[in-house]
Image (cartoon, coloured by chain):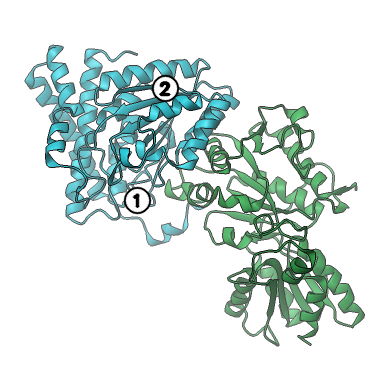
Amino acid sequence: MPLTPERLQDAYRQMLVIRKFEEAIRSLYQQGKIRGSFHPCVGQEATAVGGCWPLRKDDYLTCTYRGHGQAIAKGLSVRAAMAEMLGKATGCSKGKGGSMHFTDPSVGLLGANAIVAGGVPHAAGAALSSRLQKKDNVAIAYFGEGAVNQGVFLESLNLAVVWKLPLILVCENNLYSEMSPSHETTSVVETYKRAEGFGFEAVQIDGNDVEVVYNTVETVAGKARAGGGPFYIEAMTYRLWGHMMGDPEIYRTKEEVAKAKENEPIGRCGKRLIELGCSDADLTRLDAEAEAVIADALEFAEASPAPLPADALTDVFI
Amino acid sequence: MPNITYAQALNEALREEMKVDPRIFLMGEDIGHHGGIFRVTKDLINEFGAERVRDTPISESSFVGLGIGAAMTGMRPVVELLFMDFALVAADQIVNQAAKLRYMSGGTVSIPMVVRAQQGGGRGNGAQHSQSFETWFAQVPGLIVIAPSTPADAKGLLKSSMRAGNPVIFIEHKLLYNTKGDVPEGDYSIPIGKAEIKRDGRDITIVSYSRILLFALEAAETLAQKSIEAEVIDLRTIEPLDMPTILESIKGTGRLLVVHEAHNNCGLGAEIIARVYEQAPDSLIMPPRRLGAKHVPIPVAESLEDSVLPQTADIVNAVEAMF
């Protein structure tokens, strides 16, 4: 289904929901209500929405600890996500997973992962599973360019090609591996070239243009569903906030971040909608709708009970 | 009842389960036409095809990881590692991923995957091909750990492992593959978590498992000639540990020796003895003992390896010292 102007409005609102979700988490974090780490995806909303929206609910997704956006874009309930952040029994993992482990197999979300590249082979395995069961589901794995030097990532590239898996790998290249510029630590920093070397059909795209991401993933997902694959997409983007809460961001200048903001995906999508005939009032309405989703989720999460201490002992085995 | 080898028994378990459960498929190095270096997967590719008996590249992390992804999405992979030592190459996928994904998802996903590998020494394979890691895995919540010593147990427990629906580390021993025993035909299984008394005795309880259990049984015969009757318990499952069987036995014998091939340091002997003191401190009439590998890497030369790994005579001596 193409991203019609009407659906582009929905995508815009979805990106706003993700942005506002992260902003709400930052605020809760500053109030001391969030335990552990929080790795925001602010600035990377277009890769999440553009990549997950062309997929079916029963297609598989693995993502990273910076994966709130993808999880929500794939269909994770914002209420369940917010409750998980607050450690509530109504969270998607009943408070056992937290920020870095959003999971909901009912929407194909096999899990965000706290080990860099750790979830990539799981998506490949889901793709294999689909083939073995003669289904046409595809699997998509998100990771940052910081993952491309992990052994399991390179091993998985090889296996995906050797076994011709219906797998879509999406590298969100945001230029920084945790707190280091990636070009300082990576031999071939244009990661799609690495994938090409392994035999992938690979492209590099503008990851801040939701339409470009959407159209690219829609095309390769169709090919993968029809027996093709695997595919590699390097989506160039930028992490507007730090690696995590408390990151002093000494590795980049304020000017660089300010310049990147001019290219951030939600502002660009808004401009595009105006070009397509939307009014400022339309954008304001979409913003308010997104705000309402977050307010509802916050209310739900705050009112939800904490898990019982005894619940810590369940869910280890079936 | 057919008398077959441990390797054949495992092969039967795989074949029978693959016949009835299309979700099961195998991955590992050289397991296809080669049939695995220990012949456990012999001929399975002819029967089930290369889709279900998949030769992998030498990249343990990724194919264990693929197994996890397949397990989460409706398949039941059985992944073979050539040597248990290589599990450390895939340690992230086993320990951080397979063992934890169900818990971290609040129970919404499950990982019905078996990771099979052979371990242990006695063959001069050297320090990177002879280790025993059962305690490492038993220490991780979310993993079931199995270590059968006989062909019948191997078949029955592998079947249970494939049906368990949870991640199982299935530990074989490289020097057990050619040992023979009577194995029931057709569909039978052995419950996970149940030890078995392999020899009755009234004077001392010897707890062991895997290959060195055979040494313990040999030692028990020697001891019988010296009028010491040892009860020999085969744990069969390392995690969860069958403490009731151990406690019941020592209630009668009052003496306990734990024998394993793994290193003693923080090993299963220490764990079992600690639990005995916690759960039944008055059942022992003298301090328990444990026998494991000396605290060095496993050497190659026979004279060296035999001095590092417990032998039958060491078991006899350890028991005699307790009388």
Cβ–Cβ below 8 Å for labels 2 and 1? Answer: no
Question: Is residue A303 left or right of B82 when viewed as pictured?
Answer: left
Q: Amino acid at mark 2?
A: Ala
Q: Amino acid at mark 1?
A: Ala
**Chain B takes which shade in the image?**
green
For disc 1, the marked residue is A89
> How far across and down, in percent of the image, does residue A97 sit?
38, 49
Image quarter for residue A142? top left
> How far across and down, in percent of the image, does residue A148 sit?
41, 37
In the displayed structure, B203 sits above or below A104; it is below
> How far across and down, in percent of the image, does residue A297 sit?
23, 41
Q: Secondary structure at mark 1?
A: loop
Q: At x 58% / y 48%, what residue is drawn?
A: B167
Decide which of B12, A208 is in the foreground and name it: A208
Decide which of A294, A51 is in the foreground and name it: A51
Question: Is residue B249 left or right of A75 when viewed as pictured?
Answer: right
Decide which of B128, A70 is in the foreground and name it: B128
Decide which of A171, B67 is in the foreground and name it: A171
For disc 2, the marked residue is A202
Question: Is residue B315 left or right of A174 when viewed as pictured?
Answer: right
Q: Secondary structure at mark 2?
A: strand
**Chain letter corresponding to the colour cyan:** A
Q: Earlier in the sequence, mark 2 or mark 1?
A: 1
Q: At x 33% / y 32%, what residue is drawn?
A: A172
